[in-house]
Image: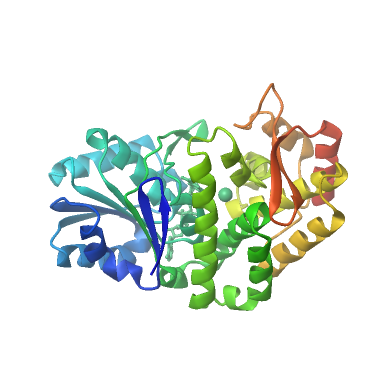
């Protein structure tokens, strides 16, 4: 068992963790009841977690919501509140979210707000949730007009990361998660970059020792960045590498079929091109990142990109300052700077390159 400490929450990584949540949670949190939230595709994993909670003496209830981004809504938050009331969940009862980023964001939001806050336990089941969404204490739901517009910061008491649960994850979701791993290596850890490259085949085969190592190192990077800047006043922005362009690509309606990780991969390619054009990163950095993204099976190009629509979207980015989007730029492998104002012609050039 490996552990990362983050702002009062304890993040555990070990194969088989899901079957041992109950006994370990007992050592951290009290309470007599535990409410388990999951989604339709994670029922089996959630049942295992629930059994372990029962064995540890908790009175349990379980709710499985439909899977998919649409469930991250105030409407579903209200449904979950109703179930909490129905199951006599009180202050001090545990709230356990078992699923991908959708379940951890919705569950985290409900746990943060119900009775002004329940102790939260997260059991992330997607690669993205294990290295990103379940770490850092941010939660949220979407409004019709935008993603993650309503949410809070609520650190979980514990996060249980079990690489074994990734075996059943659909291939496209798994590959999408690899984009966040490349991002982690690019922003903070050249050694991790080399490790991922050297062990790519094992990673693609989801071999447990390699997966455990990579997930642990990425979760540690995210935790370290969050520890430095919990409320996103400064350095936490580096976690958005590839996301400024990536989010714009995702939200240009025509590309609704693009997965988050795929958009981020193309975003990292575009942002590395900008860095090279600005003389911030050498060509070798762009080439090495491009090679690793391709090895992962991630795209670095998007044919027929509607550049004006993407530029328009960029103006609405959450990180806009003085009316201009800010970018995270690589200086080399494992080192980035943030808050960079990139001239429009360079942004356009990078977009043109990735749309070729
Ligand atoms: N709070 C944060 O800091 C943060 C960070 C990054 C992303 N997010 C959020 O995370 C969400 C995306 O998360 P995601 O990519 O995990 O998507 P997701 O939760 O929708 O999961 C993807 C799909 O995989 C299924 N699934 C999950 N685990 C499985 C398993 N082990 N086996 C089989 N199927 C499984 C899900 O049911 C779903 O169909 C977005 O809403 C995003 O905004 C939040
Ligand atoms: Zn992301």
Q: Which residue is at 20% across, 43% downward?
A: 84
**Relative to 210, residue 225 above or below:** above
Lateral position of residue 28 relative to residue 343, left or right: left
Q: Nearer the viewer, residue 225 or 58?
A: 225
Q: Nearer the viewer, residue 102 or 53?
A: 53
Q: How is the image coloured?
A: rainbow
Q: Is residue 143 visible?
A: no
Q: Which residue is at 58% across, 73% downward?
A: 203
Q: Nearer the viewer, residue 174 or 65?
A: 174
Lateral position of residue 54 relative to residue 264, left or right: left
Lateral position of residue 149 relative to residue 267, left or right: left
Query: Picture quarter containing residue 327?
Result: top right
Q: How many labels, in total?
A: 0
**Relative to 61, residue 110 above or below:** above
Q: Position of residue 1 (x, y in %)?
A: 38, 70
Q: Position of residue 230 (x, y in %)?
A: 48, 39
Q: Nearer the viewer, residue 207 or 245?
A: 207
Q: Which residue is at 68% across, 75% downward?
A: 198
Q: Residue furthest top?
A: 322
Query: Picture quarter containing residue 189?
Result: bottom right
Q: Which residue is at 63% across, 32% downward?
A: 317
Q: Position of residue 157 (x, y in %)?
A: 31, 50
Q: Is residue 291 visible?
A: yes
Q: Position of residue 184 (x, y in %)?
A: 61, 55
């Amino acid at each position: 068992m490996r552990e990362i400490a983050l702002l009062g929450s304890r993040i555990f990584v070990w194969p088989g963790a899901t079957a041992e949540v109950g006994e370990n949670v007992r050592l951290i949190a009290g309470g007599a009841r535990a409410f388990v939230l999951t989604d339709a595709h994670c029922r089996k994993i959630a049942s295992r977690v629930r059994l372990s909670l029962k064995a540890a003496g908790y009175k349990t209830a379980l709710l499985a919501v439909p899977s998919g981004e649409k469930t991250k809504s105030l409407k579903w938050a209200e449904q979950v509140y109703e179930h909490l009331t129905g199951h006599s969940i009180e202050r001090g009862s545990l709230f356990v979210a078992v699923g991908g980023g959708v379940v951890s964001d919705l569950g985290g939001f409900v746990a943060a707000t119900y009775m002004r806050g329940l102790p939260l336990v997260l059991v992330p089941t997607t690669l993205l949730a294990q290295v990103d969404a379940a770490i850092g204490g941010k939660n949220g739901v979407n409004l019709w007009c935008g993603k993650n517009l309503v949410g809070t910061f609520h650190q979980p008491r514990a996060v249980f990361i079990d690489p074994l649960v990734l075996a059943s994850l659909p291939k496209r979701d798994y590959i999408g998660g690899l984009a966040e791993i490349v991002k982690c290596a690019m922003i903070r850890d050249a050694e991790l970059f080399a490790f991922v490259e050297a062990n790519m085949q094992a990673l693609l085969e989801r071999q447990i020792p390699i997966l455990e190592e990579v997930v642990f190192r990425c979760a540690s990077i995210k935790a370290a960045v969050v520890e430095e800047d919990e409320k996103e006043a400064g350095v936490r922005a580096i976690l958005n590498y590839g996301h400024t362009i990536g989010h714009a690509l995702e939200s240009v309606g025509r590309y609704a079929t693009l997965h988050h990780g795929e958009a981020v991969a193309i975003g990292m390619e575009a942002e590395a091109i900008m860095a090279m054009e600005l003389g911030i990163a050498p060509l070798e950095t762009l080439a090495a990142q491009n090679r690793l993204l391709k090895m992962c099976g991630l795209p670095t190009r998007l044919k027929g990109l509607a550049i004006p629509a993407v530029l328009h979207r960029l103006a609405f980015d959450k990180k806009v300052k003085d009316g201009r989007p800010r970018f995270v730029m690589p200086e080399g492998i494992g080192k980035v700077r943030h808050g960079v104002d990139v001239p429009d012609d360079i942004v356009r050039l990078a977009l043109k390159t990735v749309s070729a």
